[in-house]
Amino acid sequence: MKLYPKRLRMPYQKAVGLSKEYNDNTSDVGKWLGNIFGMPFLNPEEVGDCFAMDFISGMPQNNKLTTFSDYIYDTYISDDALFPPHMWALRSETVTRTTNAVEFFHSHFKNNFYMTHPNIHNFLNVLLQLQSEVYIKIRSIGTIQTRKRTLVRKNFILNEIKKYKEGEKTRFEYVQSVSCYLKKK
């Protein structure tokens, strides 16, 4: 299972006081923060070098940013990090890097019960109903159409990966292009 650190880092970014800067696409600090979101599209072995050589060397002078970058390094990049790069970094065109489907399942499953310890018959009925829904979804996999926006993003990322592999883009240019494309406007 891959973990993607965007969601975990946002509360810290807010606590340090960088939310306004992050939302400002014209400031150097905002651009630097936005580019961080491209690092999950690197191979895990490249993350540390990219952070040290590309991000830290080009980091704008800002005490809050220094605190934030220390947090990112300690939590996500160092060898003894809580969430090391092999847990969240992968050079892949996969755009859906969230746990929304799992959260939806648990929410939906939980809403079928009105007490913490339901009757075994009710529990089994819910499981059977869920099993039927899963079978229907499995059988319809070939008919599900991917949204155009998702296809465009996937093709863009594939193209950027190709340019990076062929040497048309440097590592940092690759991270910048992918992060700028994925950053919410």
Image: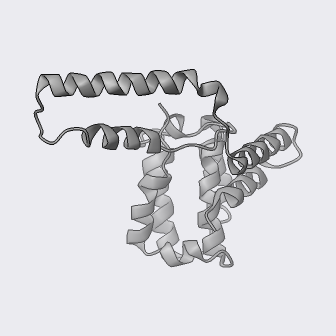
For residue 156, say whether it is visible. yes
Q: Is residue 3 left or right of residue 146?
A: left
Figure quadrant of the C terminus: bottom right
| Image quadrant assignment for residue 91 | top right
| Image quadrant assignment for residue 102 | top left
Residue at 51 percent across and 27 percent down: it is 137
Task: Give the x, y percent position of residue 15.
Answer: 38, 70
The colour scheme used here is one colour
Q: Is residue 145 above or below residue 38?
A: above
Q: Is residue 2 left or right of residue 96?
A: left
Residue at 61 percent across and 72 percent down: it is 30
Task: Give the x, y percent position of residue 138.
Answer: 53, 23
Who is closer to the viewer here, 5 or 102? 102
Residue at 83 percent across and 39 percent down: it is 162
For residue 82, say whether it is visible. no
Task: Give the x, y percent position of residue 171.
Answer: 75, 48
Task: Give the x, y percent position of residue 59.
Answer: 63, 67
Residue at 52 percent across and 70 percent down: it is 65
Q: Is residue 165 left or right of residue 92?
A: right
Who is closer to the viewer here, 59 or 164? 164
Who is closer to the viewer here, 91 or 67? 91
Q: Is residue 15 left or right of residue 110?
A: right
